[in-house]
Image (cartoon, rainbow, N blue to C red):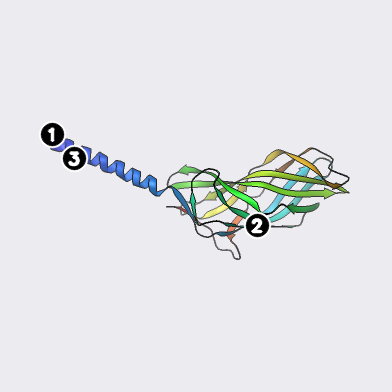
Amino acid sequence: MRTHSKVLMVSLAASMLMAFAVGSAAARNLSISNQQIRSTFRTMELAVEGIGTDRCDVTLEGSLHARTIAKVVNTLLGYITRVTTAGCTLTTGILNLPWHVRYRGFSGNLPDITLMMVRVIRASFSAGALGFFCLAEVDVEANFDRESGGRIREVRMTEIPNIPVRSGGGFGCPAENGSFRAPNNGTVTLLGNSNDISVTLI
């Protein structure tokens, strides 16, 4: 009986380990419901001493290379190919498109992740007023909030308090540093309509 019980216990432990291994292997990748994505922010701000704070409504549009994403840090996911602005308080320009989007990680316990994190590489833009123009280029961290069912609820941009700025023409740029933030979270939808985007583990 004792030998039989030991065999059962060993078999049970082996089965649990195999199930864990299979579950882990199945969670190596992320699957996105669509490769064409739009994100809209009510306000983004670039503040530079000497010209003030440039506030704009901003819409980012882009595409992913594939619907399956390996959870490998720094993997190139896709590009932001179009950026539109509205209601800007200063003269604003968008530069050097496309911007690269790379995978940075996730938060939460598999398989119920709560956050997918990416990095927008070398987001470039200009702001000007009264003949002064400043150029900024910065890597921006973006965090996509994920609901338990997989739907991406919104995206948050990480504030950057100190970014280098340089002259963009005119009388030059009156400062060497500025700051960037998006005080309002952005919406995330399929490009061309208001359908949700979802992320699942496979």
The amino acid sitting under disc 2 is Thr
- Residue at numbered disc 1: 2
Do we see residue 119 in this rendering? yes
Q: Position of residue 186 (x, y in %)?
A: 63, 53
Residue 179 in which image quadrant: top right
**Which residue is more in the foreground, 185 or 33?**
33
Indicate which disc, 2 or 3, sits on the residue closer to the N terminus.
3
Determine the CA span between mark 2 and mark 3: 58 Å
Determine the CA span between mark 1 and mark 3: 10 Å
Residue 160 in which image quadrant: top right
Residue 170 horizontal side relative to residue 144, left or right: right
Where 193 falls versus 146 (above or below)?
below
The amino acid sitting under disc 1 is Arg
Q: Position of residue 177 (x, y in %)?
A: 77, 38
Q: Residue at x 65, y 57 (%)?
A: 81
Residue 84 horizontal side relative to residue 129, left or right: left
Indicate which disc, 1 or 3, sits on the residue closer to the N terminus.
1
Do we see residue 182 in this rendering? no
Q: Position of residue 113 (x, y in %)?
A: 47, 46
- Residue at numbered disc 3: 8
Q: Which numbered disc, 2 or 1, marks the residue closer to the eye?
A: 2
- Residue at numbered disc 2: 81
Indicate which disc, 2 or 1, sits on the residue closer to the N terminus.
1
Going by the picture, which residue comes out furthest to the top?
2
Q: Which numbered disc, 2 or 3, marks the residue closer to the eye?
A: 2
- Tell whether label 3 touches label 1 (CB within 8 Å): no
User: Circle 1 — which element?
Assistant: helix
User: Circle 3 — which element?
Assistant: helix
Density class for disc 3 (Cα within 10 Å; few <14, some 14-19, many ≥20) is few
Q: Quadrant of the N terminus?
A: top left
